[in-house]
Image (cartoon, helix red, strand yellow):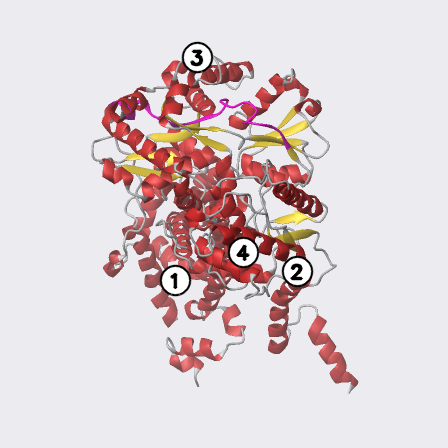
Amino acid sequence: MKIQSIFLPFFLSLLSLYFFSCGGTPPEATETEEAEEEVAATESEPTEPETESEPESEPEATPEPETESTPLKIAYSDWPGWVAWEIGIQKNWFEEAGVDVEFLWFDYVASMDAYVAGQVDAVCMTNGDALVTGATGKPSVGIIVNDYSNGNDMVVAKPGIDSVADLKGKTVGVEEGFVCHLLLLKALEENNMSADDITVVNTPTDETPQVLASGSVDAIAAWQPNSGQALKSLPGSKPIFTSADAPGIIYDLLCVSSESLEANKEDWAKVVAVWYKIVDYLMDEANMDDALKILSARVSLEPAEYEPFFKGTKILTLEEALKFWAKGDGLDSVYGSTDIVDDFNVKFEVYEEPLDTGKYLDPSLTKAYAETSK
Amino acid sequence: MSEVKSKSREHWFGIRKDLAPGRRTLLTVCSFGIPLLVWVTVSYVPFIWHPDIKLEISADRDGVTTVFTAGDRVSKEFFPTFVEAVRQENRKVLDARVKNNPHFVSRRENIKRLRHLAPLGVANGWLKNNERQNDEKIFNLWKQLAEGELASRAISLSQENLEIIEENWILLSKASPTFNLKLYPTEALLKLIPQGISSNPVYLPAPHEVINAGWLDFNTVPENGMPTMWERYRHSLNIIFWGFAYSCLLGIPLAILCGSFDFFSKLHEPFVDFFRYMPAPTFSVLFVAFLGTADAPKIMLVFVGTFFQLVLVIANTTRLLENSLIEAAQTLGAKRRQLLGRIILPGILPNLYNDLRILLGWAWTWLVIAELIGEKTGLTGFIDTQGTRYNFDRVFPVIILIGLTGFFTDRLLNWLRYLFFPWTEEVRQAPKGLLTRLLLSSTDRTTYFK
């Protein structure tokens, strides 16, 4: 009986601890508001205030309208050309350039979700995904071409399938609407086939290796590290079509929201300058070990493990980038490639109306940087 | 005599009979011991499974996109193909050399070929784990192996590889007998022939591999300012705590009201019942949209995952309270508020506490999904990154850590019942150890130490 009487106040004070220490409750409060009021009525017994000292450990993430003082938030994910930003971060080059940036590490698809939700100012994505994200969520402007995929994106087929033509009537695991789906469709087109010749199984990209190894599909389309993992986990499987077969179909960009670009143009110019500092650093073979160490540490790997992933990515120097920024119809122009991707997306009903692709690309900052660095 | 015998038999397999404490402990040990034993047996006894080769020394092949590094597994069927491909390349290099028209490669390519010896250096303890790129030490390793000063014990080098080491050393020492990276030859060096040991597939690493990887991961401080494993652990615990705390804060009062008043029950429970079938992860994008990318959407997911279950479970527990208690109190003139505070709440507390223990387990389940929403953080961020690269030996220690945390939290909470609810039948009848009695004596000396 005695303990019983001790316990009740104890429990209530524990409850009050929760009340005091979590002042800002998430919006679910509306749903249970009346319940809360009732509780307040039932537990009118005095509560011990010493519990108030509990530190507030929940970080409140409230998105605020852009001002000068908030850092530029950039979402990046596990792709060699984007992990390269890590060099600038680790070497404090952004601070040296006088620009306040915050890089946030995401899963690729989650990074685009966060961008659409307006939680970040910029996101690293491919030109194709920029269009899809724009058509279905929020448009963006690509200001930097980091690299183009040079073999890292692959269609990997199980043993016995040696070419894209052999895929006829087979099932292929791919994440629908994303960059590798595009690669797959391109592979089909180059072999005079259509999307109807295969059955697509919608598979999250990071599960493609297991799905291929399990034998439930005949081929998969994925990017590194998943594509490499697929090759390793099913011996005898081989890449039947890679981004190296269609260079320029996948450009990797830094895509900025147009509001942020307008409001902070100078800051973004500084980001461009830092990027080309990173590229210069990467181009010197003597720095390769140091660079690989920084890159691999981002994903907690050994440098030697990371090097293969880096090989399938062609990082573009300023001169090369300027060449690809020139307007043109073919895949050797970012504009041409984006137009082709747009056609594809409409044709395969990823979205319905063709987009004004020119609005998604803005080489002016890169060109301005090229002018000043001459 | 026979009576004693039959009695002891009854003790092992008596229906609804408690076993003696000693036997209970034995069985508890076995429940962990048997799975461990299976794992150890499958891992260390050859011929049970072992369909793969785990590479101890690897090599890159020219013009092939798949790169195997030491530690990777390849199937036994594929391994000879791999080895033959490297041999073939070496043969070409040697042929060219004989014809006085040697192959030339970039200096870095040669440096990389030499570095393939690094895993062997690490295995023998000659190199530290972070010295895999230390070219000077690797240079000395080649030298000492070639001159016979060192002999590898951890990995026995094949005759073929010993010859390659000597062959390469001739070329290397001719360029510069002491270490000087700039004087490294550009004439193609030979590649080490891949070597390996028979092993299980990558998803079933052996116990010692898991322990080694775990030890390394939990004791290394990343240089690039990324969180250590312990910081990740704390981060995960933080999310669980707040998610579950919010659930309890809002859920328990609501549930008790639902269980006590038909009004609240009919007002809330149908909706709660409907909502709990909606899978929480499907809201993840929504959470990110209005709560940002940091911890808030993760906490929210744990909250949504546990809250609705909690309300229903605890409302039901409240309803199970014996009606006679309430009637008795009413006879004595208790008012509504007194009934809630003095009868219902104390009456259901022991069961409510048990419910919360079970629901805490649910919270852990949601954590694993929650941490991938928005920014990748915490233990799951690590599991995900390593999992996609098939480094399961680094994944298992983290999973085991989560399991142990859950298990010991539950044990602790279970044990604390003795302190919180000594009056319940269950606790009174349970055998008490010395520590429990000590704990209890601190609250009520007279009862437990006569």
Looking at numbered disc 2 in the image, what kind of residue is underneath it? Ser
Same-subunit check for callouts 3 and 4: no
Residue under numbered circle 3: A328
Same-subunit check for callouts 1 and 3: no
Q: Nearer the viewer, residue B275 or B153?
A: B153
Q: Nearer the viewer, mark 3 or mark 4?
A: 4
Question: Residue B43 shows which numbered tag?
Answer: 2
Q: Nearer the viewer, mark 2 or mark 3?
A: 3
Looking at numbered disc 3 in the image, what kind of residue is underneath it? Gly
At which x and y percent is residue A165? 69, 22
> How far apart, in angstroms, are the residues tagged by discs 4 and 1?
80 Å
Same-subunit check for callouts 2 and 3: no
The range drawn in magenta is A239-262
Residue under numbered circle 1: B332
Relative side of B101 to A66, left or right: right
Looking at numbered disc 4 in the image, what kind of residue is underneath it? Pro
Using a 10 Å C-alpha cutoff, classify the residue at mark 3 as few (fewer than 14 neighbours), some (14 to 19) or many (20 or more). some
Using a 10 Å C-alpha cutoff, classify the residue at mark 4 as few (fewer than 14 neighbours), some (14 to 19) or many (20 or more). many
The total of numbered circles placed on residues is 4
- Numbered disc 2: what chain? B
Image quarter in which the N terminus of chain A is found = bottom left
At which x and y percent is residue B266? 46, 40
> How far apart, in angstroms, are the residues tagged by discs 3 and 4?
49 Å
Residue under numbered circle 4: B119
**Residue at 33% in and 58% down:** A14
Image quarter in which the C terminus of chain A is found = top left
SS label for mark 3: loop
At which x and y percent is residue A294? 40, 45
